């Protein structure tokens, strides 16, 4: 474990929050996972348990030892719907809620009043400026980005974002935490998309435009990138995996901030799928259908 961080409170029990809670608990941190509704927490914990079993089956020999390891990790995780109460003893807050600036700012503003002064705040935002999130608090020096990748238990990277006001001490502690949960921690400036999403999201959106123009089919686009470039997933499969709503939030935010940048233009096809509730794997349908026939 790196630095003085022991108690970590993770906000959002969705795709990312679960994974962050899992890798933190696996690596010895005590974790409180927070969501707005008990039902979201139950769903999130069920997914976390499934993922943890998958990891332990590979890491630990023998069913009994796997069960013991499972119980040890799960004993370090608790859940809560009381946001302010959940940060009373936190050394680090990691926020992984919906990709919306105002909603995240509201959360951080209320947590700022409830968390101890030394507690560090970090956001897992894919695309929003850390500086603008930190501005909702009085601890911009103790605020940074911790951008994990989906699925968190498998992806080996975390981007550690140093915003203008993030102190050296905070950045060092966040890098140590990233490494403490078993990731390669890279340093990024507070620029749109940091490193990975600045390269990845425009590529994903080009695939949607290719499909929308009728230049190629879903299967051909995905197979082309898997078989022609060795990517583990094609771009449309990856969009379904990431969540079409999350991708739309990212694109809309960038488009509003940089309206002249054609690379960030919204896609009518993506907008249509999201408006129909087709959010990808998590809703059962996106570019592909995931409901069992
Ligand atoms: N929890 C634990 N383990 C998992 C897991 C999970 N949720 N999902 C997969 N795994 C493990 C499996 O146990 C398996 O391990 P072994 O090979 O050691 O047995 C391994 O991962 C591969 O899994 P599968 O065989 O089930 O499936 P796969 O070979 O198709 O791999 C994948 C699945 C790892 C997701 C792979 O397809 C992949 O790497 N896809 C690309 C993912 C990617 O690009 N992520 C980044 C998204 S962008 C982002 O996150 C940033 C943003 O802000 C939007
Ligand atoms: P998700 O929709 O799967 O989950 C979000 C969760 O946050 C939901 O369970 C929701 O109930 C909860 N939530 C909303 N408001 C809340 C609040 N005020 N307090 C506590 N919980 C609240 O979303 P996700 O895909 O996990 O994305 C979460 C964040 O991580 C976003 O900022 C996203 O951009 C970022 N991110 C996503 C991916 C990805 O591949 N999906 C990858 C990296 C980063």
Image (spheres, rainbow, N blue to C red):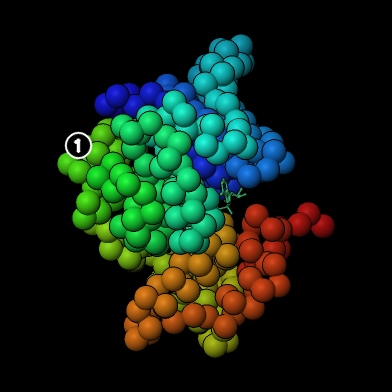
Could one spot residue 205 in this view of the protein?
yes
Q: In the shown orientation, is residue 124 left or right of residue 40? A: left
Q: Classify residue 271 by image quadrant.
A: bottom right
Residue 246 placement (x, y as % from top left): 53, 62
Q: Name the residue that disc number 1 marks.
A: 169
**Residue 162: image x %, image y %?**
24, 50
The structure residue drawn at horizontal position 46% and vertical position 24%, both measured from the top left corner, is 30
Image quadrant containing the C terminus: bottom right
The quadrant holding residue 38 is top right
Query: Dot 1, crowdedness within 10 Å: few (<14), some or many (≥20)?
Result: few
Q: How many marks?
A: 1
In the rendered view, tell whether residue 72 sits above or below residue 54.
above
Q: Secondary structure at mark 1?
A: helix
- For the N terminus, the image quarter is top left
On screen, residue 275 versus residue 153, left or right, reads: right
Residue 39 in the image: state x and y as whole percent: 72, 41
| In the image, residue 100 above or below residue 88 | below
Residue 155 at least partly seen: no
- Depth check, front residue: 130 or 246: 130
Q: In the picture provided, is 269 more to the left or to the right than 234?
A: right
Q: Residue at x 57, y 65 (%)?
A: 244
* Residue in the image at 54% along x and 32% along y: 85
- Nearer to the camera, 24 or 3: 3
Measured along the vertical axis of the image, is residue 7 above or below residue 62? below
Residue lying farthest left? 168
Q: Residue at x 49, y 49 (%)?
A: 107
Please say if 75 is above or below 108: above
Q: Residue 130: x percent and y percent?
A: 33, 56
Q: Is residue 51 left or right of residue 5?
A: right
């Amino acid at each position: 474990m790196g630095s003085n961080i022991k108690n970590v409170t993770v906000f959002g029990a969705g795709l990312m929050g679960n994974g962050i809670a899992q890798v933190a608990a696996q690596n010895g941190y005590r974790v409180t996972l927070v969501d707005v509704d008990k039902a979201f927490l139950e769903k999130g914990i069920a997914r976390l348990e499934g993922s943890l079993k998958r990891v332990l089956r590979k890491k630990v020999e023998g069913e009994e030892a796997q069960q013991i390891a499972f119980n040890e990790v799960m004993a370090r995780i608790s859940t809560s719907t009381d946001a302010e109460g959940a940060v009373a003893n936190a050394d680090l807050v990691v926020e992984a809620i919906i990709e919306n600036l105002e909603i995240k700012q509201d959360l951080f503003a209320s947590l700022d009043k409830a968390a101890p002064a030394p507690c560090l705040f970090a956001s897992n935002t894919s695309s929003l400026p850390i500086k603008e999130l930190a501005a909702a608090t009085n601890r911009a020096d103790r605020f940074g980005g911790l951008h994990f990748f989906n699925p968190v238990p498998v992806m080996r990277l975390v981007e550690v974002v140093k915003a203008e006001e993030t102190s050296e001490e905070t950045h060092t502690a966040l890098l140590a935490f990233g490494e403490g949960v078993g990731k390669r921690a890279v340093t990024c400036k507070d620029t749109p998309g940091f490193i990975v999403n600045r390269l990845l999201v425009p590529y994903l959106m080009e695939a949607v435009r290719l499909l929308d123009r009728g230049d190629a089919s879903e299967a051909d686009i995905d197979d082309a990138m898997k078989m022609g470039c060795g990517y583990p997933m094609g771009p449309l499969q990856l969009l379904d995996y990431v969540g079409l709503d999350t991708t739309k939030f990212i694109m809309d935010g960038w488009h509003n901030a940089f309206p002249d940048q054609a690379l960030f233009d919204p896609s009518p096809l993506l907008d249509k799928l999201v408006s129909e509730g087709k959010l990808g794997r998590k809703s059962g349908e996106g570019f592909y259908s995931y409901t069992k026939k």
